[in-house]
Image: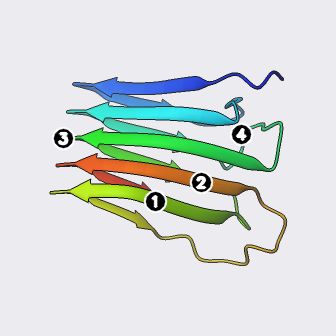
């Protein structure tokens, strides 16, 4: 798999990536008056690091990571929220998932 970038966009609707899909090393998620879900639990990745650039403007971005993942979340929430609910052992061999979250009247959640 090449190291291509990928987009997931939800504008006035919903967008879901799940099952066995192939995100690039960097994926961008944009939710504007809609919800965007990136379920990475069965995703086929080419490396041990994934970067998610999430923008939630009046919508929500939800990132679901594999068991054993280490999550690094950064960014800014203005009249919204960014959070990680990941509980588990990050030394279990899962990928490092870096989430750069920008939430404006929306939410970015990692679970």
**In this orientation, which residue lies closer to the viewer: 22 or 71?**
71
Q: CA distance from mark 2 to mark 1?
A: 8 Å
**Residue 83's image quarter?**
bottom left
- The spot of residue 66 in percent (x, y) is 69, 57
Q: Considering only order in the chain, which callout, 3 or 2, is on the residue closer to the N terminus? A: 3
Q: Which mark, by number, is residue 58?
A: 3
| CB-based contact (under 8 Å), mark 2 and mark 3 | no
- How crowded pointer 1 is (Cα within 10 Å; few <14, some 14-19, many 20+) is rated as some
Mark 4, secondary structure of its residue: loop
Q: In this figure, which residue is indicated by the disc labeled 1?
A: 74
Q: In this figure, which residue is indicated by the disc labeled 4?
A: 43
Render colour scheme: rainbow
Q: Is residue 12 above or below residue 88?
A: above
Q: Considering only order in the chain, which callout, 3 or 1, is on the residue closer to the N terminus? A: 3
- The spot of residue 6 in percent (x, y) is 58, 24
Q: In this figure, which residue is indicated by the disc labeled 2?
A: 98
- How crowded pointer 3 is (Cα within 10 Å; few <14, some 14-19, many 20+) is rated as some
Q: Is residue 77 above or below residue 92?
A: above
Mark 3, secondary structure of its residue: loop
| CB-based contact (under 8 Å), mark 4 and mark 2 | no
């Amino acid at each position: 798999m090449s190291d291509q970038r990928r987009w997931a966009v939800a504008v006035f609707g919903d967008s879901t990536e799940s099952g066995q899909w192939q995100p690039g090393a960097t994926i961008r998620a944009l939710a504007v008056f809609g919800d965007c879900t990136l379920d990475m639990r069965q995703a086929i990745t080419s490396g041990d690091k994934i970067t998610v650039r999430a923008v939630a403007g009046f919508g929500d971005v939800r990132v679901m990571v594999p068991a054993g993942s280490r999550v690094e979340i950064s960014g800014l929430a203005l009249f919204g929220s960014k959070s990680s609910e990941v509980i588990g052992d990050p030394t279990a061999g899962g990928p490092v998932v870096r989430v750069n979250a920008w939430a404006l009247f929306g939410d970015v959640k990692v679970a």
